[in-house]
Image (tube, rainbow, N blue to C red):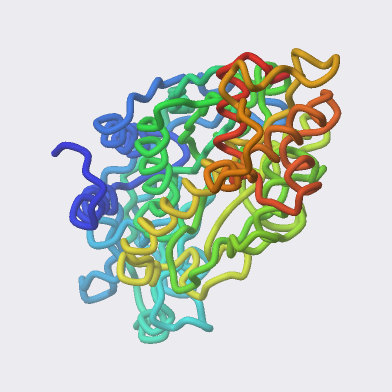
Amino acid sequence: MAYQETEAFYSELFDELFPILRSITGPGLRQSYDIFNRYMPLQLDSIPSGTSVFDWTVPQEWHCEAAYLLDPDGEVVADMKRLNLEVVNYSEPVDRDIDLEELQSHLYSLPELPDAIPYVTSYYQKRWGFCLSQNVRDKLKPGTYKAVIKSKFYDGHLDIAQTVLEGNSKNEVLLSSYLCHPSMANNELSGPLVLLGLYHRIKQWPNRRYSYRFALHPETIGSLGLLHLNGEHFKQNLVSGLVINCMGGEPEELVFKHSRNDDCALDKLLYHLNDHGFAHSNIPFSPLSGSDERQYNSPGFQLPVSCVSRCFHSGFKEYHTSLDTKENMGIRQVLDSIDKLEKIFLAFEQVATFENKFPYGEPNLGKRGLYPTLSFFSKERTSQLDELNHIKMLLNYSDTKHDTIDIANLQGKCVTDMQSAISKLEEQKLLEMI
């Protein structure tokens, strides 16, 4: 199946990815990378189990071939093969008979959502358990149950996948999403699917001012692993970044959680675009909630990384449950998110700080075809006035202290209005990006 930006393609790809038992390490994660690798060339970097990654340690790989719970009559209460949320992710092996009273401490349900099966993990402390709906739990019979989890832990790797679309500069934009949850839609697959779409959109651009790095990895330990591998590179080259998650659901508007310092090019652009008709919401950084942006914005790094979602920051009732399905996510919303984010980054391509290479007086624009050489106020010249004004402003304020957003703001214009003028001045070697 070749890549196509259609609802049918994304729906089929979703259906292939959804049943996979993913975790923060192990075969399900690699299987998912292999599927994405068909459509974007991913380099896999592996960090061995036991490696110290800042204050964390890369855990062993978790392999689980079966997990089921039988009631006293032999009826199935929970079964990983039916839905992989029904086993606590990273459960240690167990094969025992157990009374209901003791079993209760190994069961997880949500009284507030009685039809939902919760998603529960125990990555860093060994335990075992099953997840079931509150309705099922309330009907459990007294007696002896059979609990079986056929899992193993191996010294393996934390795997991180990434690829880069090179631009005209080493200045880099990081676009990342996590891929570690099992069968959930909006909270798991919407982000990677949008990332895939953005890769293909940006790849088709005829010219890229910036380089774009696309990263897929498990949540938290994966972003820490990426910083372990690329932290010094990011400190030198990263100009902006965006963590992409929860890109489906009912809300139509994208919500951007800004970086900790709220001073990078993307932060500035998002506010600017709001003033010029782009409909999205901006919220301040907070470490109290969120995702991988907390690692990038930690005090030792303070990288300019924001986060975007349609509903993560406001919350949605299906979050981390079996109710987070393809129907609730919506393939249409995924494609709409790709459209909206591409528009943001097309605008981002016009954000730069330039140096005027002919700063002593005004350069001769006429001999470069950028200014009329006949002093006659024709309709044609009048129609060129907007671009001429952009050119004059860009030349005068490209003093290494003002970026293109500053210059656009001085005119009450959107930075996207200046695209043609910026391009022509660069072609004529009158401006050079610093």
Inspect this view and state whether residue 73 appears: yes
The front one of 367 and 356 is: 367
The front one of 97 and 127 is: 127
The front one of 82 and 430 is: 430
Left or right of 372? Residue 213 is left
- Residue 239 appears in which quarter of the rendering? top right
Left or right of 352? Residue 332 is left
Query: Which residue is at 51% across, 28% downward?
Result: 213
Query: Which residue is at 48% across, 27% downward?
Result: 158
Left or right of 262? Residue 100 is left
Instruction: State whether residue 329 is above or below residue 338.
Output: below
Inspect this view and state whether residue 91 appears: no
Instruction: State whether residue 105 is above or below residue 340.
Output: below
Q: Where's residue 46, x and y in %?
A: 46, 20
Q: Where's residue 249, x and y in %?
A: 44, 69
The quadrant of the image that shows the N terminus is: top left
The quadrant of the image that shows the C terminus is: top right
Q: Where's residue 407, x and y in %?
A: 77, 40
Query: Which residue is at 66% across, 22% downward?
Result: 365
